[in-house]
Each structure stands twice: as structure tokens, then as C-alpha cells.
Amino acid sequence: MLNTLLSYVGINDVVDVLATSVLIYYVLLLIRGTRAVQILTGVLVLIALLGAANLLHLYAMGAILQLLVVGAAVSLPIVFQPELRRALEQIGRGGVFRMGEEPIDPRRGEDPTIAMIADAAFLLAGSGLGALIVIEQQSGLKDFTESGTFLDARLSVELLLAIFNTRSPLHDGAVIVRGPIVEAAGCFLPLAEPRSGERRIGTRHRAALGLSEQTDAVVIVVSEESGGITVARAGKLTRPIEEQQRLIRVLLAVTRGPRERRTPNDFVTQLRTRLFPQIRRERSRADHPQELHS
């Protein structure tokens, strides 16, 4: 029986099944926790009802269900536009086959950029001013910087306080920070769709969630009403952070330094470093040249 089975199943068939399984797994990862799950479930229910109608020879019901399924198939690219955009963006930066999150290098220390952002966030919260501060990662945010006012100014606590002052014409939008540079201010961010069963959140928080869903950016939100400070990343919002040092630790844990942002963490890179350990050692020496002289 085994020989007969092997005569029908070849290596290509096994590879085909494994590749299809991996593809389905990553598609489910992409849509997990989004409204696409409910929409996809509804489409599958329609297909199941169509199959049952055809099996029971219910021709009128089958024709109606067939039209509904065709209409749903045509509208899927429009309905899933945010998810498709996010998937293509992750493929572009090599994030689909990402092998989990890399641990933050403990030798990184306190980033002065992160310290200034945290200091400004607590000063703004203490003054009752709202703010949206975006820290750019691997995903380019040029589309969003073009929606605001281009600054290209060196980051400082005083600059952030001046931008989010209520008398400033740029205080309503978001500030986009790339490294030690404030790229733009007064930027418009995409709003996240309201999710059923979740507590109602303000426009600033929805904008932070919307950008973090579409990109890998980290967004700090300072609430004007409550003075609470939260961090949005990967479509999720943290609890309000009440201590400045804790905010610094959180931001260090979810952001990368300039060199770390250029280091990919995808499946191919992980496989190559496991097969050729000397690549990992050479990369470690390049990232920390001071160790060679210690």
C-alpha cells in the first residue's frame, strides 16, 4: 500500500502541500484580530449555503446565493483594502516571514532621542496638552509627511512643546520623527476602524492605531482630556503609562536603533545565520567595534 501511495505522491506534491499550508498560515496571521475575520466567515457561510442549496436542488435559492457569492468575490479587494495594503507593505520590508521579534540589545543604553520624546510627552501631559508623536521604523512614512508641514529640524523637547502648544497652527496633527530629526508636523494619520466589543476611544488614539496597523511605526499618544500617555504599535494600544522611566523602557523595547532597523529578521536571514554562524559573529563585531579593543 505504501508503494502504491508513493507511486501517486511525489516530492513535488509534498512541497506543494507544505507551501500551501505555510501560505494559509501567514494569511491567517495577517487577518488575525481584524474585521477581515468576520467578513471571511460570512463569505464561507454563503459558500456553504450555496453548496447545500445545490445538493438539495433548491434552484431559486441557489441562483440567489450564487449571485451573492459572485458579488462578495468582486467586492473582496475593496473590503480588504487595508489588510491587502498591510500585507504588501510587510512583503516589501521582508516582514511576512519574520521569525519573531529580536530581543533589544541591552548594550544599546538610553537613546537620547527616546529620552527627549518621553520628557516632552510628560511635560505636555502635565500641561493638559494633547499630542501625537510618530517614531518611524523600517516603513517609509513619506505619504504621511507630505500631508503636513515639512520641518527637517533637529529634535528637542522645546521644539515638541512649541509644536503642540494650542497657539501653534501645527498642534492638531501628528509629528513624525526619524532618528534625531523631526521630519514634519501637522500630519494627518489614517483612522482605525471601530471594532465591536472594544471601548470607545478618541480620534488621536484611533489615528495612532490606524498608522500602527498599516506600518511598523511606533506612536506616542498624549490625551488632552485625561493626560494619559499610551503607546500604539502593531495595531495595539498599551495601558496608560504613569512614569517617565517606564515610558523610556517601553519605547526602547519596541523601537530599534538606526543600525538595528537596517538588519532584517526574516526567514531567509535567520536560516542563513544558522547555516553560517560566522556571518552572525562578523555582524556582531560590526555592530560593536568597541569590543575588539577592550
Image: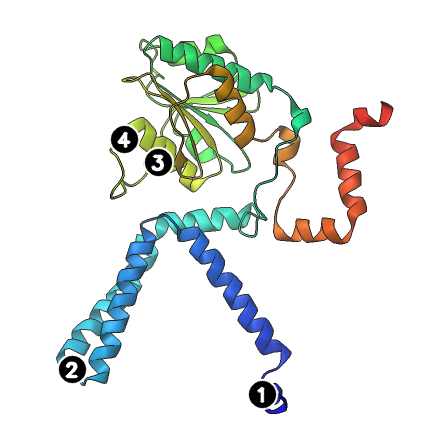
Residue under label 4:
201
Residue under label 3:
190
Q: Which mark is residue 5?
A: 1
First in residue order: circle 4 vs circle 3: 3
First in residue order: circle 3 vs circle 2: 2
Give the CA separation, mark 1 to mark 3.
53 Å
Q: Position of residue 134 (x, y in %)?
A: 45, 27
First in residue order: circle 1 vs circle 4: 1
Image quadrant holding the C terminus, namely top right
Q: Is residue 98 above or below residue 76?
A: above
Query: Badge 2: few (under 14), some or many (20 or more) residues near its Cα, within 10 Å?
Result: few
For mark 3, give the secondary structure: loop
Q: In this view, does 14 lie above or below 134?
A: below
Farthest residue, direction front: 1
Q: Which mark is residue 58?
A: 2
Image quadrant holding the N terminus, namely bottom right
Kindly tell me whether residue 1 is visible in this rendering.
Answer: yes
First in residue order: circle 4 vs circle 2: 2
Between label 1 and label 4, give the one nearer the viewer. Answer: 1
